[in-house]
Image (cartoon, rainbow, N blue to C red):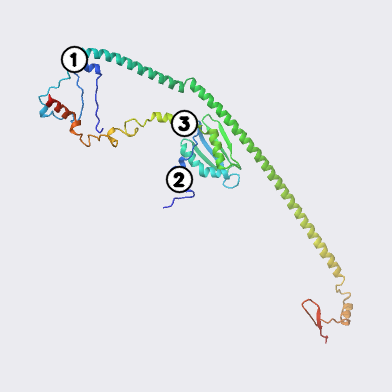
Amino acid sequence: MFGVVSVRTAPLFRLLSPTCFQAVTVRGRKSRNDPKAKSKADRVKVPPPVDLAEMVVLKERFTQYELIIRALRAEFKEEMLCQRYEEEVGSLAEEKARHETEQHRMLMAWNDAENERLRKLREHRVKQEQEQEELKTLQVALALEKRMEEYIKEKELEILTLQEESKNFITLDNLEQRIEDALDNPKNYNFAIDKEGRIVKRTEQK
Amino acid sequence: MPMKGRFPIRRTIEYLQKSDIFFKNTVKIMTVNYNTHGELSEGARKFVFFNVPQIQYKNPWVQVVMFKNITPSPFLRFYLDDGSQVLVDTEGKTNKEILQHVKKILGKPEEVLRAEELAKMVHSNPANFGPKKYFPRECMCEMEGQVPCPGLIPLPKEMRGKYKMQAEAEDA
């Protein structure tokens, strides 16, 4: 409800007692300083009438009732506090903690085993990679060596052919001899060839 | 208006709430070392990209730190409150495998989560009335179908004590 309504209720047996006329104070609609209504100016507030015999009986019954209720409430509260204590501090908590540490230890062991397995895999992989690297370098070295050998052979062949050709070179010694040979044996280059390279036509040199 | 960034679904609440990893109370820091290139780090990269936001959402009090390109192989390291460290090697694993592994070793088990949920429900009973901050409703007059608040709509005369007393007086 909007607006705070505070009800100060006295316990029931106090209300029932004849000596005390304590009224129930309720703030309600009017604030503290509002005057009393004109229609209520003569009103005398009288507490509800009390039947004495009934009051005595009720008082007796209420004391017993409240005693029982209080006892029950205390009983339940005690039970709940015991349970909470057991859970937080007592044997139950110890059992739980022990179980948890045991579980943690097992899981850590499992994790370590998993790490070990991965470590072995990694080492194997690294080893393989290293071997492949070595093989690769070896192959590269071999290829290089082979290339060098081929190069040397090629150069040797070139030298040999050059040596062979040098036998036919024109030097100062055989210059005159070669000139006379050339003049004695004129060569005629006036010929035509077909697509296969055979000589087809010759014209005489003039 | 389209969402921003790659895989913007990672920024939705629904996606973040999908995770079911709740770290144990002893876990304080989670460190992820991974590399930005390489096949072996692929799972760790995906884990960081897709799953770390979910984990952080569900465990706001755990510090999560990422390190890139520091070590040749990827791993996770957890620092517990008793000073011990837990190393989890993630080389060659997929992000799902990493998630399952982490959940198994350091996640709260199902029973504990259920028990905690029950305890929370017991403490916050939705049937209770009280201040709006802590309870669903303050007064029955707020509920549909109930008598409306007499502060807003006056009660009919038959329900008011004043008129009942007057009627009794007249009868008497």
Q: Nearer the viewer, mark 2 or mark 3?
A: 3
What residue is at 23 percent from the left and 16 percent from the top? A14
Return the x and y of residue B102 as percentages of the image width and height: 54, 36
Res. B114 mark:
3
Q: Is residue B87 left or right of residue B15?
A: right
In the image, what residue type sits under mark 2?
Answer: Arg
Q: Nearer the viewer, mark 1 or mark 2?
A: 1
**As displayed, is residue A194 above or below residue B41?**
below
Return the x and y of residue A16 as percentages of the image width and height: 21, 16
Quick one: SS at disc 2? Answer: helix
Q: Which residue is mark 1?
A: A51
What residue is at 59 percent from the left and 33 percent from the top? A111
In the image, what residue type sits under mark 1?
Answer: Asp
Figure disc tally:
3
Q: Chain of mark 3?
A: B
**As displayed, is residue B164 above or below residue A163?**
above
Q: Is residue B150 left or right of residue B99?
A: left
**How crowded is the residue under tag 3: few (<14 C-alpha within 10 Å), some, or many (20+)?**
few
